[in-house]
Image: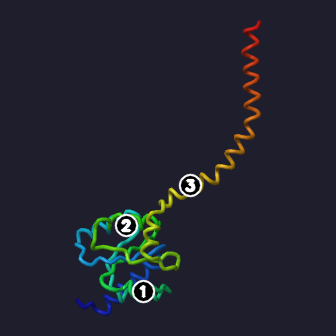
């Protein structure tokens, strides 16, 4: 079904906006997938703060090129859907791979993050990373560990002295 030039320009502007706002872009082939499964994928990706849209190959390629992104030509063959990660690329990739598990009609073609092209294996590796809040908590724990150890080390002599005084005080009344 042909779409009008005005509709193509609107779609191109929307694609450009999504590419500019996203931290990562993941391309998916969905040949033979049912609408119900695509809606399930769309819902899972939205839960992570991303978007999942079926796109026209020529318009998507043009929008990516206008934003300085080059993908291999074979990424835009057959049917293409794009997942845009606006907040946390790892969470969006995980939601996408979880939603496509067991669905032989949907497969990841590749992606883009930080201006670099990702292979399907790299997208899978990205999906296996912990979400951003977990990474932040881990980093905070690593940064706090030396400080807490220093505090324990500095407090230990005083704690030992207090234990000696308490033991002495408990023995003195018993002896008297």
Q: Residue 22 carries which label?
A: none
Quadrant occupied by the C terminus = top right
Residue wearing tag 2: 97
In terms of depth relative to the viewer, which is nearer, 37 or 23?
37
Residue wearing tag 3: 138
In percent of width and height, residue 87 lies at 47, 67
Q: Is residue 87 left or right of residue 158?
A: left
In percent of width and height, residue 23 lies at 48, 73
- Callouts 1 and 2 close, C-beta under 8 Å: no
The residue tagged with tag 1: helix, strand or loop? Answer: helix
Tell me how far mark 3 sits from mark 2, CA to CA: 24 Å
Residue at the extreme top: 176
Q: Is residue 21 above or below residue 153?
A: below
Quadrant occupied by the N terminus = bottom left
The residue tagged with tag 3: helix, strand or loop? Answer: helix
Q: Which mark is residue 63?
A: 1
Task: Specify few, some or many for label 1: CA neighbours under 10 Å numbering under 14, 14-19, or 20 or more.
Answer: many
Tell me how far mark 1 sits from mark 2, CA to CA: 24 Å
């Amino acid at each position: 079904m042909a779409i009008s030039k005005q509709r193509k320009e609107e779609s191109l502007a929307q694609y450009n906006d999504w590419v500019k706002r996203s931290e990562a872009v993941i391309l998916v082939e969905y040949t033979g997938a049912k609408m119900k499964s695509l809606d399930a994928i769309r819902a899972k990706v939205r839960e992570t703060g991303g978007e999942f849209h079926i796109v026209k190959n020529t318009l998507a390629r043009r929008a990516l090129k206008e934003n300085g992104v080059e993908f291999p030509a074979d990424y835009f063959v057959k049917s293409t859907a794009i997942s845009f990660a606006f907040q946390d690329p790892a969470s969006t990739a995980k939601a996408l791979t979880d939603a496509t598990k067991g669905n032989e009609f949907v497969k990841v073609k590749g992606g883009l993050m930080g201006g670099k092209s990702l292979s399907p294996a790299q997208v899978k590796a990205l999906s296996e990373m912990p979400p951003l809040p977990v990474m932040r908590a881990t980093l905070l724990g690593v940064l706090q560990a030396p400080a807490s150890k220093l505090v324990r080390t500095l407090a230990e002599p005083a704690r030992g002295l207090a234990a000696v005084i308490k033991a002495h005080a408990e023995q003195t009344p018993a002896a008297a």
